Amino acid sequence: MTPPTRSPLSAALEGCTILIAVDRRSLELTAALERHGATVRTAPALTIVPHIDDDALLSATRDLIANPPAVVVVTTGVGFRGWMEAADEAGVLDDLHAALEGAQIVARGPKARGAIQQAGLVADWVAESETSAELGEYLLAQGMEGRRVAVQHHGSGADGLDDLFQTAGADVVSLTVYRWGPPPDPEVVRRSVIATAQGEVDAVLFTSAPGAAEWLATARREGVLDDIADLSDTGRILMASVGPVTAGPLRRAGIEPLVADRGRLGSLVRAVVTHFGSGHAAHLPTVAGRLEMRSTGAILAECHIPLSRTGVDVLAVLFDAAGGVVSRARLQDALPRSGANTHAVEMAVARVREALGAPDVIKTVVKRGYRINVLDPAD
């Protein structure tokens, strides 16, 4: 039996192609974006490799059951859930739960807190900045001498927490629940960074700092990172992260992302929908209404108008000029296989005009070229 199709929530993302560099919960994120009209591509830059069968993890777990911790540090939601699953498979979940009930439990962010609550426990404190540094400072201020501390690590390692607490005199039990592995398909990631640099994507979404760093590293290896940064600067591509930690690699690469106000996938989706649906995307005021670019066409006077790939490329060059005159030679460069055929430019512009249904949006400047007919600010 075919499951019923869920009705769309809005058309805010109509015409948008959104790339998600996510492995975990990609189906959930895709479904949420599609319900607002987006076309979604996935290109996970890393995978999560669980340690559920890791003898070291189970040994440390049994040690904590025998000698319960005073403090439990939870750095990631997926890691904490994986730990509980590993304990369940080993038949010691109830014993572990009892051992943790009397501990002070601190979380690195809201996703970690959610996993703690899902396990039937309570987080005593949550780092607002979602950083291990803030978490460490908070615990050090309480004094760690002689305290037994269980630290659940994320896939990138300990963030220095083990050494920090040991130096302060704590008895640290380290728990590595999962690690980051290579992408499922490196060629998909390679093609995704090239497509993004060529304007075939409207937004790229990241939910982990290591995933963002690896995707950017691929863009750097392919020589397109600067192009992506330029498109982000002009507002032609939205780079978005689930929280400030995930935003770190992007900012270090010179890209300022949209950061969800809460570290959850739902908040990330809402931030992207608000960006495109509430007038925050790059736009031009034209004689026919507000004009926005999309990877699949344009939004003119709040209507999505599909265009061919050539049509998008031609309109994008004119859009980037923001009302300035673009020569025929420059437009010719944007056309594939046009050679020295200036007639191809005229035909391409004519097709875009026809598709827009508003010929006056693209104005011919005699002997010079074409420009978007942008309204004067006074009008």
Image: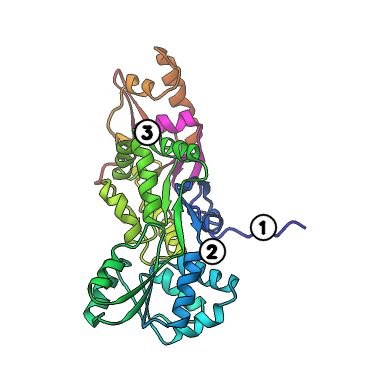
Give the camera-side residue of 257 and 143.
143
Q: Position of residue 316 (x, y in %)?
A: 38, 34
Say whether residue 332 is magenta.
no
The mark lying in front, picked from 2 and 1, is 2
Q: Which residues are magenta?
A: 294-318
Residue drawn at x 52%, y 50% is 38
Q: Earlier in the sequence, mark 1 or mark 3?
A: 1
What's the amino acid at mark 2?
Answer: Ile
Residue 308 vs residue 122, the one in the foreground: 122
Relative placement, left or right, of 226 versus 272 is: left
- Name the secondary structure under disc 3: loop
**x 26%, y 49%: residue:** 252
Residue 311 within the segment the image draws in magenta: yes
Whole-number angstrom distance, CA of label 2 to CA of label 1? 35 Å
* Of labels 1 and 3, the one closer to you: 3
Q: How far apart, in angstroms, are the residues tagged by discs 1 and 3?
A: 39 Å
Mark 3 closeness class: few <14, some 14–19, many ≥20 residues within 10 Å: few
Q: Amino acid at mark 1?
A: Thr
- Residue 52's label in the rendered image is 2
Eye-nearest disc, 2 or 3: 2
Amino acid on which disc 3 is placed = Glu
Whole-percent x, y for residue 119 in the image: 51, 77
Q: Which mark is residue 5?
A: 1
Left or right: where 254 falls relative to 359: left
Choose between 92 and 282: the one closer to the eye.
Answer: 92
Please report contact status of discs 2 and 3: CB closer than 8 Å, yes or no: no
Residue at 24 percent of width and 82 percent of height: 142
Is residue 311 visible from the viewing direction of this image? yes
Question: In screen coordinates, is 207 left or right of 135?
Answer: right
Which residue was labeled with disc 3?
Answer: 222
- The quadrant of the rendering that contains the N terminus is bottom right
